[in-house]
Amino acid sequence: MKVVILAGGFGTRISEESHLRPKPMIEIGGQPVLWHIMKIYSAYGFHEFIICAGYKQQVIKEYFANYFLHRSDVTFDFSNSGEMTVHSHISEPWKVTVVDTGYTTMTGGRIKRIAPYIGDEAFLLTYGDGVADIRIDEVVKFHKAHKKILTLTTVNPGQRFGVLEVNKEDLVTEFHEKRDSDGYLINGGFMVAEPELFHYIDGDQIFLEKEPLERLAEKGELAAYRHEGFWQCMDTQRDKEKLEMMWNTGAAPWKVW
């Protein structure tokens, strides 16, 4: 299965960094969050990626064009016509296709644009800003068992703030810190899709999360794999700092490789 990663948005809620590069290229531990996502999939044997690029797409292309060089020990001999010798290198078993899916194209439209690279086969699909300790093989197994057009992974994002319980007299009856049971389920990405999904997307300005998913749900073609482990979206600077701290302290649950 090929892995499709949505990596073309503006990342407006983390503009401190995204004004320089696409949000998926913001680094955690010296590597883009996109790299972390790819390492998760690769750990389960999925090595072929299609990156749906858009905003500052050249940054993504240049990263992969120079990946081998940047991960290697190299000697540049300027006395010998600038000869370059590679002494050792760290590589990946990856095949990466970066597709410019448009500057202002929405999530559904980006998926529609990469249809020629998928063909008539199921594919994996996720967002370029979320990491998890998810068992990709179990998601695929779940999808095949349910035989629906799309399987998404549900996660509980928790809450950022303390929780208040208020009665009819406007008195606080309970206050407690955030806990998972207070949250609600959202689409955490890490999806599996059949090629029929393309038929539910009409053009560039279609959000995957709107009409396509709503229509699939109405037709009973949208399955939900429940992930109850770690999941974190890098949506804000605060999220980035949280992930950075986890990585630097050796407590990154998504590091399954």
Image (cartoon, rainbow, N blue to C red):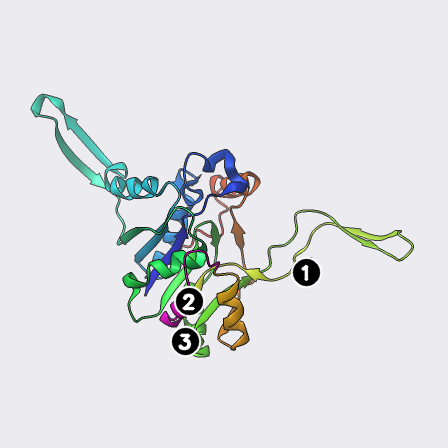
Q: Nearer the viewer, residue 53 or 75?
A: 53
> What amino acid is at disc 2?
Val
Classify mark 2: residues with Cα within 10 Å, few (<14), some (14-19) or many (20+).
many
> What amino acid is at disc 1?
Ser
Which quarter of the picture shows residue 60? top left
Q: Which residue is mark 1?
A: 181
> What amino acid is at disc 3?
Lys
Residue depicted at 43% across the width and 48% down the height: 104
Q: Which residue is mark 3?
A: 144
User: 113 left or right of 212?
Assistant: left
Residue depicted at 7% across the width and 24% down the height: 80
Q: Which quadrant of the rendered structure holds the N terminus?
A: bottom left
Q: Position of residue 185 (x, y in %)?
A: 60, 62
User: 232 left or right of 7?
Assistant: right
**SS class of the residue under badge 3?**
helix
Would you place residue 206 above or below residue 120 in this image?
above
Q: Earlier in the sequence, mark 1 or mark 2?
A: 1
**SS class of the residue under badge 1?**
helix
Q: CA distance from mark 1 to mark 2?
A: 27 Å
Residue depicted at 69% across the width and 51% down the height: 178
Would you place residue 190 above or below residue 65 in this image?
below
Q: Which residue is mark 2?
A: 192
Which residue, as the protein is rendered here, is positioned at the far top?
Answer: 79
* Magenta-colored span: 193-207
The label shown at residue 79 is none
Classify mark 3: residues with Cα within 10 Å, few (<14), some (14-19) or many (20+).
some
Q: Is residue 245 visible?
A: no
